[in-house]
Image (cartoon, rainbow, N blue to C red):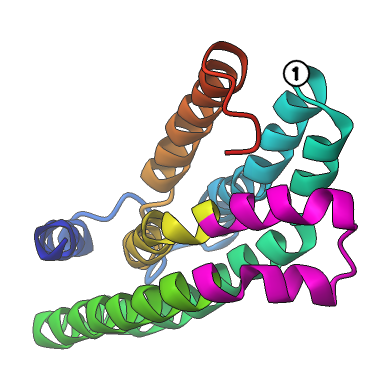
Amino acid sequence: MHLIYVRIYLKVITLSKTADIDLTSGSLAKKILLFTIPIILSNIFQLLFNACDLMVIGRFSGDDSLAAVGSTSSLINLIVNLFIGVSIGANVVVANAVGQRNEKKAFNAVHTAILFSIILRIILTFFGIFTSRLWLELLDTTAEAIDKATLYLQIYFGGIIFNLIYNYGSSILRAVGETKKPLLYMLISGVVNLLLNLLTVIVFRLDVA
């Protein structure tokens, strides 16, 4: 895990010297547009992951399964937006350091983000797994769907580490003007998610799991 972030840091230092989109000089209008569009698309695709699950479950499983996955949508969207919001903080600090060409400050910012993300993912993983049913009860999930919804949400929290890696890593890369690669990674993972959904639901009949 640490090696992943070290590679991100090295990428930051490299890109800070040869950034694809340098927002510190020249005309900003075109650069802001080129910088922003991939970010918007990445966030939309990230929010569509749960929708993809809903489409597959709705087509190939029962009504209870569809209701179970659907009942988690608002909570999952809240979590995703929380990650996006918190990672913006790392983006701002790293961008500031890169703009100053201060490698030491950039190094400290990236490694602080690493430590924070490690702490956050440990807390969220255990907190989410053990409180999933409670949150669903507070959302008035139906008795017929709550068992499957709890399983779905617990698995989601079990893999939340990858969500954090993506959001923090992409946020740091965006700080130096690199927005295309995070979009590419999101597109690839979206296709993989869809294919695995079809495989596990249709072939292995794992239903909500």
Instruction: Name the residue rendered at 31%, 83% in the picture.
Output: 119
58 relative to 118, above or below: above
Name the quadrant containing residue 99: bottom left
Q: Is residue 29 above or below residue 198?
A: below
**Extreme-top residue of the structure:** 203
Say whether residue 71 is visible. Answer: no
Residue 209: x and y in percent read 57, 39
| Rendered location of residue 150, percent (x, y) | 66, 58
- In-front residue for pair 138/17: 138
As shown in the figure, which amino acid type bears the numbered disc 1? Phe
Is residue 142 covered in magenta? Answer: yes
Tell me, yes or no, whether the highlighted magenta stretch contains residue 130: yes
Label 1 SS:
helix
Q: Tell me the residue that label 1 is attached to.
A: 60
Q: What segment carries the magenta color?
A: 129-154
Position of residue 75 measured from the top left corner of the image (x, y, whole percent): 72, 66
Q: Which residue is rendered at x = 35% and y = 76% of the image?
A: 122
Question: Compared with residue 128, is residue 156 higher up or lower down, i.e. above or below?
Answer: above
